[in-house]
Image (cartoon, helix red, strand yellow):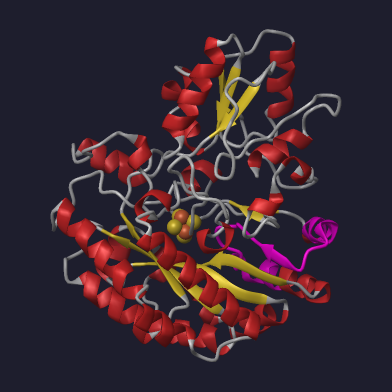
């Protein structure tokens, strides 16, 4: 999505070819005057290999995205220029410098862009038919929290920046679509603004999925509005059932929440939930695997994602584990949230992997899917979505693809259950990051 936004900021007479390696391969023999490349951590080795090949042919490369922004010096070894942070304000200048043949090695914006008057992404350059959820519309960036495992606030800042609601509505109308995915890390952030957004969505008569934190359950008026505006399901970062682990990782929105009651409240409004859990936090004990799976079944989560803690560059836990010399692999291709790349504190890496596999295997067993999906909640479309997501996870699990197809860095992007490409992963990287 980010490159399709940059495409719309590029002079209109420039011929562009946009390739998303989640759904198609880059042609390394293609002719070009400039290659612009964005990657997350797990796709960085592939991104660097592509950049090297084009540069060998004398074609200049500019890199940006989550990983190059976190480790610009590393990316600079593979690129003529690195753009650090959000690129909207920087891209016109970067492009002009390349066009004039005098790019600078690094570009770093003084300020993060305000999200007014954002250009519409050039979706015409994407193979939208290859995505499960092609109609993705961002409404905000940033997060005031600083969860240790997450790179959202280091990259996007600790202040919510909201797009004006009329601009969001105009973009949705321009799509002419009935289903929308909101990739915001927390679409229920700023309750008054969230309520205004949901009110404005009601006349559009769409169905939508998004990401948010479970504290939304405290506001039943907001939940009513969400349901009326077409919310089918939310991806929520539960992360851990242990208050100690939540406190140690600074997951403030979840502290003190009664998860069972919160989930039941949200379900009562016909909104399904995909819960995300992280295994291997420093205070986690090996008993958590069974406890977590039992919990997910008890509350009948629509779907769940079980990740192992991954120290993404840019996230506070990366610096912590690096300082403690507990990172065991800097092979970024393993940073999929499916491989153990550090020494856990209270268990071995093998126990952590086995626990994660147990959780996936149990949760996506046919009896569990039947128990959780054959419940009346929301519309028939909700039920179909829940069944499809569960069967998709189960298929990937049985194909041994879960460890290599989980999301990359935790940061703003579509919820994985809803935005996964239809095609198999080609580069061992996921498509999304989460709250
Ligand atoms: S995990 Fe969610 S609440 Fe925590 S910093 Fe990231 S986006 Fe914010």
Rendering coords of residue 164 (x, y %): 77, 56
Q: Residue at x 57, y 53 (%)?
A: 421
Rendering coords of residue 46 (x, y %): 46, 31
Magenta stretch holds residue 172 = yes
Magenta stretch holds residue 184 = yes
- Examine the rendered structure and indicate whether residue 141 appears above or below residue 111: below
Q: Residue at x 23, y 39 (%)?
A: 327
Q: Nearer the viewer, residue 420 or 38?
A: 420
- Dividing the image into 4 quarters, which one contains the N terminus? top right
Q: Residue at x 32, y 41 (%)?
A: 318
Left or right, residue 332 beside residue 231 = left
First to last magenta residue range: 166-195
Could you tell me if residue 213 is visible in this image? no
- Examine the rendered structure and indicate whether residue 76 appears above or below residue 241: above
Rendering coords of residue 27 (x, y %): 60, 27
- Examine the rendered structure and indicate whether residue 36 appears above or below residue 381: above
Q: Residue at x 66, y 37 (%)?
A: 3
């Amino acid at each position: 999505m980010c490159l399709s936004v940059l495409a719309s900021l590029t002079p209109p007479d420039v011929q562009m070819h946009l390739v998303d390696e989640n759904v198609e391969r880059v042609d390394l023999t293609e002719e070009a005057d400039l290659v612009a490349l964005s990657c997350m951590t797990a796709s960085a080795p592939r991104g660097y290999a592509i950049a090297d090949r084009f540069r060998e042919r004398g074609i200049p490369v500019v890199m940006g995205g989550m990983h190059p922004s976190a480790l610009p010096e590393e990316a600079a070894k593979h690129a003529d220029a690195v753009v650090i942070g959000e690129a909207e304000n920087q891209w016109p200048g970067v492009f002009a410098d390349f066009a004039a043949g005098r790019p600078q090695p690094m570009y770093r914006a003084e300020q993060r862009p305000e999200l007014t008057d954002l250009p519409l992404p050039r979706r015409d350059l994407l193979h939208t038919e290859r995505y499960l959820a092609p109609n993705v519309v961002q409404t905000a960036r940033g997060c005031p929290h600083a969860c240790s495992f997450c790179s959202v606030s280091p990259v996007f800042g600790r202040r919510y920046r909201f797009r004006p609601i009329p601009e969001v509505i105009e973009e949705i109308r321009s799509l002419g679509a009935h289903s929308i995915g909101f990739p915001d890390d927390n679409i229920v952030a700023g309750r008054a603004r969230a309520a205004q957004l949901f009110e404005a969505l009601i006349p559009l008569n769409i169905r939508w999925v998004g990401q948010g934190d479970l504290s939304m359950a405290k506001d039943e008026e907001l939940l009513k509005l969400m349901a009326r505006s077409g919310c089918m399901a939310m991806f929520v970062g539960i992360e851990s059932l242990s208050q100690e682990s939540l406190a140690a990782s600074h997951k403030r929105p979840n502290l003190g929440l009664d998860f069972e009651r919160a989930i039941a409240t949200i379900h009562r409004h016909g909104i399904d939930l995909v819960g995300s859990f992280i295994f291997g936090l420093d205070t986690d004990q090996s008993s958590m695997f069974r406890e977590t799976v039992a919990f997910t079944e008890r509350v009948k989560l629509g779907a769940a994602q079980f990740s192992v803690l991954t120290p993404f560059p840019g996230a506070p836990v990366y610096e912590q584990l690096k300082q403690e010399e507990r990172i065991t692999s800097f092979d970024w291709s393993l940073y999929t949230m499916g491989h153990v790349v550090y020494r856990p504190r209270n268990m071995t890496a093998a126990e952590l992997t086995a626990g994660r596999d147990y959780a996936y295997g149990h949760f996506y067993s046919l009896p569990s899917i039947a128990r959780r999906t054959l419940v009346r909640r929301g519309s028939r479309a909700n039920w179909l979505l829940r069944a499809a997501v569960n069967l998709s996870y189960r298929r990937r699990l049985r194909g041994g693809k879960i460890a290599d197809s989980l999301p990359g860095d935790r940061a703003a992007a579509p919820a994985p259950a809803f935005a996964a490409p239809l095609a198999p992963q080609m580069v061992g990287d996921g498509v999304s990051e989460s709250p």
